[in-house]
Image (cartoon, rainbow, N blue to C red):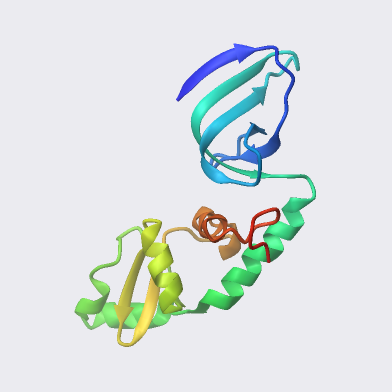
Amino acid sequence: MSIETTNLPVVGRKYRNSGGTAGICVCESVCTRFGTVRFVSPDGEQYLIATNVWHTCWTEYDVAETQRTLQKLVDREVCQNVNELIDALSGHQDPCVWSFDPDTLEFWTVTSWFAEKLEEYGETCVYVHGLHVWGRCCSGQAIMLDGVIEDIAAGMEILPGQRYAW
């Protein structure tokens, strides 16, 4: 990542990254990608420009609509929590469950299409006795808030302002 300082006015869309940092993206539309981002300094006069930063853009009005879109995606593709099933299979030394990351906190059945998408984004999905099971490595928040869900939605271009917005 390269960074420079400038007094140029901020033009672009608000963005956030996985760390929750907010800034202004200079891309032309809603995006999830590596790109250039401007940060307003605490004194409000300097702007940092960082290039090659992974970020997702949105506008003020997009936040609620983005959350609705992400929830629709989860409702359509994530089926049921199967923690008890996986625990039972683990207790019986079933080899189907050996592929899960030891840091997995929750197990969810997903559609076959969504299992492929999750795997494309580095998530672990295992075919367990006829079910596609996603090993979710975070817990305590709604699934729609997982970064991977937003990444998949952005890749599908279904977020507000994108080509196929839902």
Give the residue at x 42% y 65%.
117
Residue 76 point in image, percent of width and height: 58, 77
Give the residue at x 68% y 66%.
166
Residue 75 point in image, percent of width and height: 60, 75
| Res. 105 in view | no
| The image quarter in which residue 99 lies | bottom left
Residue 73 point in image, percent of width and height: 59, 69
Q: Is residue 136 left or right of residue 79?
A: left
Q: How many numbered discs sit on the rendered protein?
A: 0
Give the residue at x 47% y 20%.
2
**Above or below 78: residue 68:** above
| The image quarter in which residue 160 lies | bottom right
| Res. 126 in view | yes
- Quadrant showing the N terminus: top left
**Above or below 144: residue 87:** below
Q: Is residue 160 left or right of residue 105?
A: right
142 or 126: nearer the eye? Answer: 126
Give the residue at x 70% y 53%.
161
Residue 144 point in image, percent of width and height: 59, 62
Residue at the right extreme? Answer: 61
